[in-house]
Amino acid sequence: MADSALSIRTIGTADFPDFNRVFAWSFLDEPVEEQKWLKVLELDRAHAVFDGDEMIGTGGVLTRELTVPGGVQAPVGAVTAVGVKPGNRRRGAASLLMKTQLHSIRDAGESMSILWASEGGIYRRFGYGEYASGLSKLTMPTRMPFHPGVPVSPARIRQVTREEAMPFMREVHDRVRRTRVGWLSRVEGTWDVHLADSESDRGGLSAFRYCLHPEGYVVFRVKRDGDSGGPKHALHVRELVCETEQAYADLYRFLLDLDLAGSISFYTAADDPILHMVDNPRKVVREMTDALWLRIVDVKKALPLRRYSSDVDSVLEVADELCPWNAGRWRLTVKAGEAIVTRTDDPADVSLDVAALGSAYLGGARLSLLRRAHRVAEHTAGHVDALSLAFLGDQVPHCPEVF
Ligand SMILES: CC(=O)SCCNC(=O)CCNC(=O)[C@H](O)C(C)(C)COP(=O)(O)OP(=O)(O)OC[C@H]1O[C@@H](n2cnc3c(N)ncnc32)[C@H](O)[C@@H]1OP(=O)(O)O
């Protein structure tokens, strides 16, 4: 329950300095002027929580398209900039914000919300499901040969300036993101945030390097390192986006063979094919973490948006206190990949809370695994496994950018 002294409203540009400060302080940071992320905020979708005249909480919703299984672009509200000023915690400011956001996302016709969580303990209570997409940090030595049979084309790879790279990258990204589960549409400001490159953004690394292939591109920074044995610079890849698997192999080969480089690290998809491309996969060290958290805001709309891997006919009993329109029993019938969702009074085959459904929605967390974790209950034998299979897709969901 929110403290009754708290109120909430959307912000105007005059609120930017306070918004910037409250958010920075919530992260124990100093406010920096000219924040690029402030420019991507949509004023009619950014809220501030007040105690009287004092702004104490912040949060924004960005209008995006999320690619869901089947290559469908689903409109989503991407939640960002959630912060509560120290000294005002646990008064219900974030709860008030979450409730307001979820209602406004539904009113905007979006059936899902997504976010990156600063801490794993915050968002489940608001119905967001963890591991909707995961992230794999790969670290590997350079010079590793490819497995025999992985072709490398003679295509030319050119290092160019950011200005030269941008038009090509925008076009390639917009085509590729429509085919990758978990990828998002970008607006102009997204690029400025994602590829922010001021001195303070670099964390002691170089400016971004931009290298183009005819069918893809790679953006990376260099961390200079070397001893008497010679330079062994580390390449920190920010983004590797390709329209063809050949370009993907070519650009990886380019990085692996770059003179003076000793290692490559890359936060990438759990199903990045590099593990199966190199001749010694154990040299690629992997660390997994959670990435997108997904909240189904409108069950009836969200479930039919995606495509499914197999037929099912099950009654799901969904628990959802914050969005009561989702709560209750739904019949999910999938035929040839397409789903129909209807209200029903029939007994439930499976029951789960809306966060578990969000975890499974993109094919990130298996429903059968969530049952083993006591997050999904089966009332009719065989239904969880059938649903689990139907929700899995060919791709492991991945979101390449933090928003
Ligand atoms: C998408 C993003 O922007 S992620 C960034 C999130 N922001 C941050 O991490 C910045 C630092 N943290 C903060 O600003 C705040 O602590 C917030 C935003 C996480 C929470 O704000 P608050 O106003 O304190 O949350 P609120 O009072 O509404 O708490 C609601 C419930 O969540 C719980 N909760 C809140 N924060 C946390 C946390 N970090 N870990 C575990 N539980 C939490 C509360 O205990 C409360 O539980 P209850 O309902 O059982 O009593």
Image (tube, rainbow, N blue to C red):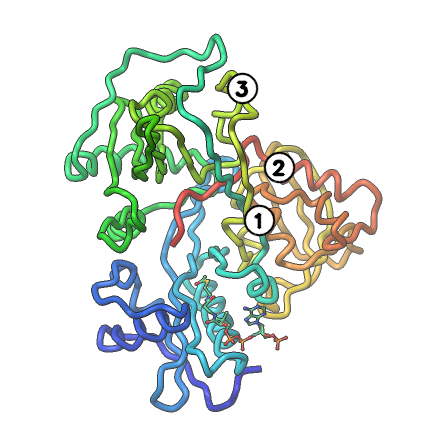
Instruction: Label 2: state its secondary structure.
Output: loop
Residue reaching furthest to the front: 228
Residue 280 is marked as 3
Residue 225, image x and y in percent? 33, 36
Tell me what residue is drawn at x 73 percent, y 43 percent. 368
Of the image marks 2 and 1, the number of the one nearer the N terminus: 1
Left or right side of 325 for 42: left
**Is 22 above or below relative to 154?**
below
Amino acid tagged 2:
Leu
Label pair 2/3, CB-CB below 8 angstroms: no
Viewer-proximal residue among 218 and 230: 230
The amino acid type of the residue labelled 3 equals Asn
The alpha-carbon separation of the residues under discs 3 and 1 comes to: 28 Å
Residue under pointer 1: 131
Q: Nearer the viewer, mark 2 or mark 1?
A: 1
Q: Amino acid at mark 1?
A: Tyr
Q: Which residue is mark 2?
A: 392
Q: Are marks 3 and 1 in contact (CB under 8 Å)?
A: no
- Quadrant of res 390: top right
Q: CA distance from mark 2 to mark 1?
A: 14 Å
Q: Residues within 10 Å of mark 3 (few under 14, many from 20)?
A: few
How far from the left and from the top, in percent, is residue 175? Answer: 33, 33
